[in-house]
Image (cartoon, rainbow, N blue to C red):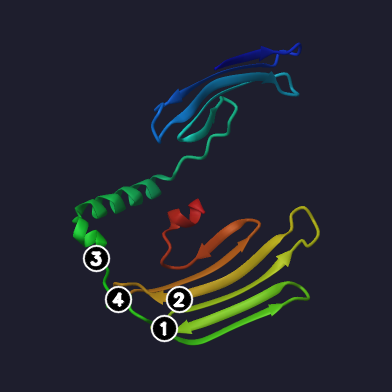
Amino acid sequence: FLRSFETGNDITREEVGELKNVGTPEELQIVRGSYKYKDPEGNEIVVTYTADENGFVPQGAHFPVPPAIPQEILEALAKNAEEEAKLSEAERAEIDTGRYGYIPIISENFDLNPVDNSYNFNYVTGDGSERHEVGAIENTGTPVEGTAVQGSYLYTAPDGTPVSVNYVADSFGYQPVGPNIHPAIIKAV
C-alpha cells in the first residue's frame, strides 16, 4: 500500500507498506514512513519510521540522546565479555552445585503497617548473608508520590571478600554506598 496526505496547516504523512515472506509462517507486513508537523514554538518536527519484525522504530533529530556510558563501565563490560569468551560452552553451562547449594534462613522478619503503608524486613542466612530494609510512601497524594527505601545487605563474595552495601532508593534513584562499589559505578547510578 501507499498512503500520503497533507493538511492545510502543513502536517504531512507518507507511508509505504509491503508484505515480507509471503506465503510462509513468517509472513509479515513491513511499513516505512514519515510524518512532519510544527511544534508550538514553530519548529519543524520530522519523524521517519519503520515497523517490522523489530517493532516500531522512529527516528528524528529532536529525539533525546542518552548520555555517554562512562569509559570505566565500557572497559568493565569489555573485560567481562573477554573473560566469558575464554570459557568453553561446557564451562559456561556448568553449575557449581557446591557453591549454589541450599542455604538455610536463620531468621527473618517482615512487618507491614497498613496505616501509613510503611514496611520493614530483614533476614539472615546460614552463610552469614544479611539484608535489612525499611520503606514508606512519601509525598502521599501528590503527583510525585513514590516509595522511599533505605537498606543494607552483606554477603561474602566467592573469593572470600566481605561485601557490604548500604543504599537509599527514592525519587533521586538508587544510591548504593560501600567499600566494594567502584566509584565509576556509583557515579553512573
Labels 3 and 1 touching (C-beta < 8 A) = no
**Secondary element type, mark 4:** loop
**Secondary element type, mark 1:** loop
Identify residue for label 2.
Answer: 154
Q: Residue, x 78% and y 76% (percent of image)?
A: 115
Q: What amino acid does circle 4 point to?
A: Arg
Q: Position of residue 6 (x, y in %)?
A: 69, 12
Q: Residue, x 52% and y 24% (percent of image)?
A: 31
Q: Can you tell which mark lies on residue 128?
A: 1
Disc 2 from disc 4: Cα separation: 17 Å
Q: Quadrant of residue 164?
A: bottom left
Q: What amino acid does circle 3 point to?
A: Glu
Labels 1 and 4 touching (C-beta < 8 A) = no
Disc 1 from disc 4: Cα separation: 14 Å
**Secondary element type, mark 3:** loop
Q: Quadrant of residue 171?
A: bottom right
Q: Residues within 10 Å of mark 4 (few under 14, many from 20)?
A: few
Q: Position of residue 59 (x, y in %)?
A: 54, 27
Labels 2 and 3 touching (C-beta < 8 A) = no
Mark 3 vs 4, N-terminal side: 3
Give the left or right position of residue 88, taking residue 157 as reference. left
Identify residue for label 3.
Answer: 94
Instruction: Name the quadrant of the N terminus.
Output: top right
Give the left or right position of residue 157, taking residue 115 as reference. left
Q: What amino acid does circle 2 point to?
A: Leu
